[in-house]
Amino acid sequence: MNSDWSKYIQGINTLYCSRSLRFSDMFREKYLNAFGIENKGRFLETGCGPGALAEALHRWYPAAEITGVDRDEAFIEFAKRKAPEIRFQVEDATALSFPDDSFDVTISNTVAEHIEPSKFYGEQYRVLKKGGVCLVLSSRRGIKINAPCVEELSDFELEIWERASLRREEYNKKAGVCLYPMNEREIPLCMEKYGFHHVSTEYITVNLTPDEPFYSRETAQAMINSDRECDLEGADTLREIAADIVSEKETAELKRLINQRYDKRLQLYDSGIKQWDTDILMIMIVKGVK
Ligand SMILES: C[S@@+](CC[C@H](N)C(=O)[O-])C[C@H]1O[C@@H](n2cnc3c(N)ncnc32)[C@H](O)[C@@H]1O
């Protein structure tokens, strides 16, 4: 067990902020329709990260007993503090400690592509009860358009990101990031291969456009600040993966510039000067029955 993912790949704030939006109650009905599962029984979320989806499941299925597991101890510690009413524990998805036929539902979001399929799907299948449902969520190609004030990086920033890019690749490779990518055809085929039947697919879109008039100021700010957190944590990660080639002073300057850009974006929002920057997520949900 380790904290490599949260330290080197994606930090706690990055995943917690972005997933809290992705699994916000604004999109509840879409998920409930796509999942098509009952509000009862034992649910297992594999690779739960800091726990935003498990929290949503707890809100949406209050009669179910939710367990979230991840290999990364830092995520699990954070998730436990944030939502003590949910059971979180450190587990390796390739060798879960649960007995066969333990759960009514297994679910994961953007996890399967990082784990060898026979092990990931094999374990999902093993721990499900007969008739239980496995839900595999993944992000497909969406639309991401930044506001100019956020997009335009200085030469200083471009040079630092370029300097650290090889290191980033090395660490991603070491952690097995996206080692097993599958397209929209391959995931359902793979679930059938590992024993699931009645396999079906569903797609839902999540519209994160701060300037949409139907979003409150608070929600719009959360969207803008989620991107800010992601960029700030990306800069912090440089201290972990590239401290010998990017100095502390450079990281601090990088973070100052990031904050400046997002402060400007918030100012524009508050002045009513629309940017129509957008993040349209397309989430694929593959469902199979044991
Ligand atoms: C892209 S993150 C997604 C996290 C979370 N599902 C979310 O959407 O925020 C991938 C997650 O898979 C976890 N992970 C990768 N390999 C794992 C394994 N063998 N066992 C358990 N968790 C694993 C990582 O620690 C990380 O939390």
Image: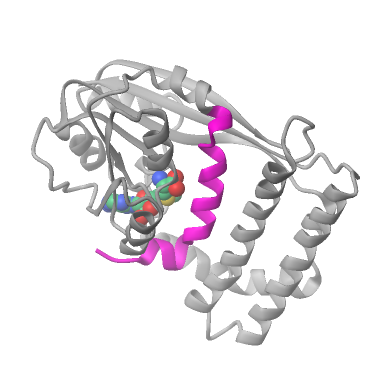
Look at the image and tell me whether residue 178 can be seen.
Answer: no
Count of numbered labels shown in the rendering: 0
Please report the residue visible at 67 percent of the width from the left and 82 percent of the height from the top.
250
Residue 150 image-quadrant placement: bottom right
User: In this picture, which residue range is highlighted in magenta?
Assistant: 1-27
Residue situated in front as seen by the camera: 9 or 116:
9
Would residue 143 be found to the left or right of residue 14 on screen? right
Q: Is residue 150 above or below residue 35?
A: below
Locate residue 86, reporting x and y percent. Answer: 31, 45
Residue at the location (63% across, 62% down)?
Answer: 231
**Image x and y of residue 48, in percent:** 36, 47
Is residue 22 visible to the viewer in this orientation of the structure?
yes
Please give the name of the residue rendered at 41% of the width and 60% of the height, measured from the top-left corner. 173
Name the quadrant of the N terminus.
Answer: bottom left
Q: Residue 209 lies in what quarter of the image?
A: top right
Q: Is residue 156 above or below residue 25?
A: below
Left or right for 29, reference 133: right
Depicted 166 relative to depicted 271: above or below: below
Instruction: In this rendered view, identify the residue nearer to me: 137 or 85.
Output: 85
Instruction: Choose between 179 and 98: the one closer to the eye.
Output: 98
Residue 129: within the magenta? no
Type of secondary structure dominating the magenta stretch: helix
- Residue 120 in the image, given as x and y percentages of width and height: 25, 40
